[in-house]
Amino acid sequence: MNRTNRSLVAAALSSAALFLGACATPPAPFDYTAFQQAKPVTLLVLPPLNESPEVTATPGVWSHATQPLAEAGYYVLPVALVDETFKQNGVQTPADAHGISHTRLREVFGADAAVYLKVTRYGTSYQVVNSETRVDVEARIADLRTGQTLWSGKAFATSAEQSQQNQGGLVGLLIAAAVKQIIGTATDASYNYAGIAQTRLLGAPRFNGVLPGPRSPLYGQPPPAK
Amino acid sequence: MMAALALRGLLPLATAGVLVGCAQAPKPLYMWESFPKQQYQTLLGSDLDTTAQIQALEAHAEKARAGNAALPPGFRLHLGMLHLAAGNAGTARTMWLAERVAFPESGPYVDTLLKRLNGSAPATSKDNPA
C-alpha cells in the first residue's frame, strides 16, 4: 500500500467513525401522538422532588419552570401560590404532592396537565483546582383529565461547559477555582444553573422537547426534526 | 486532507447557523423582570419582606404598562397572594379577577382561590404565604 492509499484509508476510516458517531448519538424522535391529541392549555407545575442534598433545589428548580413553559405558549399556575394551596390542603412535601391522584389535582387546580419534576443533581462540588456547579432535572408532563403521560425529558447545565474553554495554566486554574468558590457561595450559583437547565428542559421548540402551546406563534407546527 | 477541507468548508456554515439562530430568536411573549426570582424568594419563605416584594412587583407592572408589554401568567395571582398576606383581601380579589380577564384559562383556579377567600373569615391572615 503506498502512502496516498494509506492516507485515503485513514481518511475513510475517520470519516466512517465520524459518521457512526453522529448516527449513534441522536435519540429516537419522541412520539407526540398523545401530546398532540391532549392539547393542554394550562399547566400545574408540582413541587420538584429533590434527590440532591441541597434544600434549595426544590424552590430553585420550581421557580425556574414558569418562564420557559409560559414562553412556550402555556398558562402556568404561579408556583408560590400553588405551594400555598397545597399547604392549605395539608400537602407538605413534594412527594406528597406527587402522590395525589390526577383527578384530585384537576379538581383543585383546574389545570389540563401537570408537570412532574425531579432534581437529581443540584449544587457545587469542590476539588483542589476546580469546582463544578451542576443542575440535573428530569420532567414528565401528564394529562390531568386522563392521567396519561404526554411527554418526558431531562436536561442539565454545568459550569464545566464554560471552564473547558479556559486555559490559564495551573495558577490560572487555582485562581479561577477560588473565584468560583466565592461566586458559588455568594450568589447561589446553582440557582442560575437551574435556570439554564430548566430552559433546556422545558423551552420550545426543541428537538424531543415540549410542544409549543396555544399562546405561542409556533402552536400546531410539527416539532423540530433534530 | 479531504476531511480537513471538508471541515474548513463546514466552519462558515456552522457560523452562519449560529447567526441565523440569533436572528430567529423570537420576541418574548411576556415581560419577566425579576418575577422568577421573586417567586423563588417567596418559596424560600424564611425572611420574606412582603411589602418590599409588593413594591417590586408593582413597579414591574407599571413598567409593563408603560412599555405596553404583557405581564406573565400568574403574575396577578402571585401579587394578589402577597396583598392577602398583608391583610388586603379586597386588593387580592381585584388582582385575581384581573388575572381571569387577562388569562381566561386561569378561571378554574381563580374560582378555587375566590371560594377560599369568600369562605374564610375576614381575610386578615398575616401568615407567611410560603
Image (cartoon, helix red, strand yellow):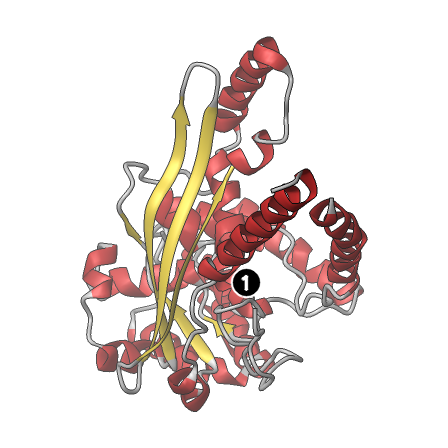
Q: Which residue is mark 1?
A: A68
> Which element carries disc 1, helix, strand or loop?
helix
Left or right of B41 on screen, residue A93: left
- Out of B109 and A177, give the one closest to the viewer: A177
Q: Position of residue A213 (x, y in %)?
A: 54, 79
Give the answer, above or below, for where A58 lies relative to A38. Answer: above
State which chain disc 1 sits on: A
Question: Is residue A152 shown left or right of residue B67?
Answer: left
Residue in the image at 27% along x and 86% along y: A146
- Give the residue at x 58% y 73%: A224
Residue B36 in picture, x, y percent from top left: 53, 53
Which residue extends farthest bottom? A37
Outermost residue, top side: A171
Along the line of sight, the residue nearer the viewer: B95 or A55: A55
The one of B99 and A203 positioned closer to us in this rendering: A203
Q: Where A19 sits versus A156, above or below? A: below
